Structures are given as C-alpha cells and as structure tokens.
C-alpha cells in the first residue's frame, strides 16, 4: 500500500529528512563533562558523545557539526532549531521529557560525591552531607543540582555554570563537597589525587539519552535502531573502551 499524504507530510517535516537534505547533522553539546564532551589541546570538542555522534553522522552519510551550547540553554537551543539533537550526557528525567523526547538510554550513571579530604571518615555517604554545617557545590541546572535539593536540602548549595568551577570550590576549601555524575567524578579524582576523596557509590539512577524535538517518529525510529545496532555490533563497546577504560 502507498504511504498516506499525512505520512509523507510527517517525513517532509522530520528532522532526519532535513538533516539529509542539508547534508549535515547539527549536534548541541556542552564541553566540560568528562569523558562525554570535553576540549582537547587544540580546543576541539572530543569524547564519548562526540565519537558516537561521528559514527551516527557517517551512517546517515552527512557531515557533523558539534555546536558548543551552555547547559542552561541547551534545551531552548534544541527547541529553537539551533541544532537537530542534544548528545551531551543528558539524563532522561520526567521534567525534561515534558519538553523534549528522549531516545532509549545509551548508558546509565548516578550521582556521587567528591569530598574535601578534611572530612574523611566524618562524611561517608550523601545522608551525612544533609546538614546545615556543610556547603555543597555543583553545576546549575544539572541533575546534580536537583539531587542536592532533594536529598541534601539542609546543606548550603552553591551553583556554578561549569563542572570545573564547582569542583574547584572543594579543592580551594570553599565547599565541603561537589556532587556530580559518577564518570566525571571518577576521572577528576584519578587526575587530582589527594585533593578530593571520591565517595563512589551512586545515590541516584540516571539513564542518559539523546534529546530531539517532539513529534518526530521518523527521526526517533532511526536513532533507537541505530543505538541497538551499535550496541550489538561492537561499535559501542569500542568507543566505550576508548573513553572509560583505565
Ligand atoms: N547528566 C547530567 C544532567 O543531565 C549532567 C550532564 C551535563 N552534560 C554536559 N555536557 N555538561 O544534568
């Protein structure tokens, strides 16, 4: 049977169709979240997300344009068509899901704690930090921000635009702890031995997904099948090993 007029309409409007016509996939990402999106020495954005985006663009037969976008403006940027997709370690949350659609999760992480070494033994988990005498730093508008407000509401919370500003607060003695996604904290603590103590038991459950505008079943179908394919054929494992094995 022939596709109906409305099916053709849907495909005409699909972001996937626009990407193919343009010959370029525009990805919103924010550099700063190791090992997903970060700057290399040349200033280019590299990481786990970028490598996945590269293979995806290749599968579509189009060029890739990574657009660095501030975290608190990344969903608005997608909604105003500054990019086709957000691939930026974004946690799938119900609140965000009201505004955008998410693919199936491509990885699952959770919040952990980078503690001031001064508090070694005194603070052993997130519950201990839920106290007015403690100051916690994290990134504005990240799920860590929401997690601190939910689980450590008694503590003082200081929010920063970037991960690196937040974690420096602990190193400089201005905060007692930095709360953030486990992968970032694991890499930071490995690279800054003695400056922070990683309490590496996740206290949230956070599937990460790619975000696209609502009402686009054709693009979503491509993305979820593409994810299933690379998870099954070894492509995903290769990229994972490159960025997460240490
Ligand atoms: N997973 C966390 C969130 O969704 C942090 C992601 C931050 N990503 C970034 N590229 N800076 O809020």
Image: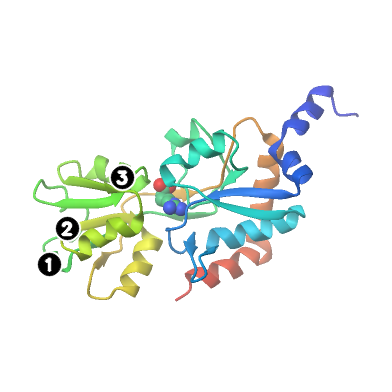
Q: Quadrant of residue 231?
A: bottom right
Instruction: Tell me the element at label 3.
Output: helix
The residue carrying mark 3 is 145
Above or below for 110 versus 147: below
Q: CA distance from mark 3 to mark 1?
A: 23 Å
Which quarter of the rendered picture does the C terminus lie within?
A: bottom left
Q: CA distance from mark 2 to mark 1?
A: 8 Å
Decide if residue 187 is on the left or right side of residue 235.
left
Residues packed near mark 2 inside 10 Å, few (<14), some (14 to 19) or many (20 plus):
many
The residue carrying mark 1 is 118
> Is there CB contact under 8 Å for labels 2 and 1?
yes
Instruction: Tell me the element at label 2.
Output: loop
Decide if residue 76 is on the left or right side of residue 192.
right
The residue carrying mark 2 is 176
Q: Quadrant of residue 183?
A: bottom left
2 or 1: tag closer to the N-terminus: 1
3 or 1: tag closer to the N-terminus: 1
Quick check: can you spot residue 82?
Answer: yes
Residue 223 x/y as whole percent: 66, 47
The response on whether ligand 1 sits within 8 Å of label 3 is yes
Residue 40 x/y as whole percent: 50, 68
For the point 73% across and 31% down, the residue is 13
Quick check: can you spot residue 127?
Answer: no
Instruction: Tell me the element at label 1.
Output: helix
Residue lying at the far top in this picture: please name it. 5
Residues packed near mark 1 inside 10 Å, few (<14), some (14 to 19) or many (20 plus):
few
Residue 204 x/y as whole percent: 34, 49
């Amino acid at each position: 049977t022939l596709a109906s007029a409305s099916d053709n309409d849907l495909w005409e409007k699909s972001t996937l169709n626009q990407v193919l016509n343009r010959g370029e996939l525009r990805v919103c990402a924010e550099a700063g979240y190791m090992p997903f999106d970060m700057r290399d020495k040349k200033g280019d954005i590299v990481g786990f997300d970028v490598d996945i985006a590269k293979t995806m663009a290749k599968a579509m037969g189009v060029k890739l344009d990574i657009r660095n976008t501030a975290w608190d403006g990344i969903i608005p940027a997608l909604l105003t068509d500054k990019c086709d997709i957000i691939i930026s370690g974004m946690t799938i949350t119900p609140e965000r899901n009201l505004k955008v659609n998410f693919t199936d999760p491509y990885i699952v992480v959770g919040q952990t704690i980078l503690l001031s070494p001064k508090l070694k033994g005194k603070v052993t988990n997130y519950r201990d930090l839920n106290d007015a005498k403690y100051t916690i730093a994290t990134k504005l508008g990240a799920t860590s921000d929401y997690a601190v407000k939910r689980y450590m509401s008694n503590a003082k919370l200081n929010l920063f635009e970037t991960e690196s500003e937040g974690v420096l607060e602990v190193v400089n003695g201005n905060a007692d702890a930095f709360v953030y996604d486990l992968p970032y904290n694991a890499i930071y603590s490995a690279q800054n031995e003695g400056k922070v103590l990683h309490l590496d038991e996740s206290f949230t459950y956070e599937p990460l997904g790619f975000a696209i505008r609502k009402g686009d079943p054709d693009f979503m179908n491509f993305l979820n099948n593409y994810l299933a394919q690379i998870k099954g054929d070894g492509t995903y494992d290769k990229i994972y090993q490159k960025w997460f094995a240490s």
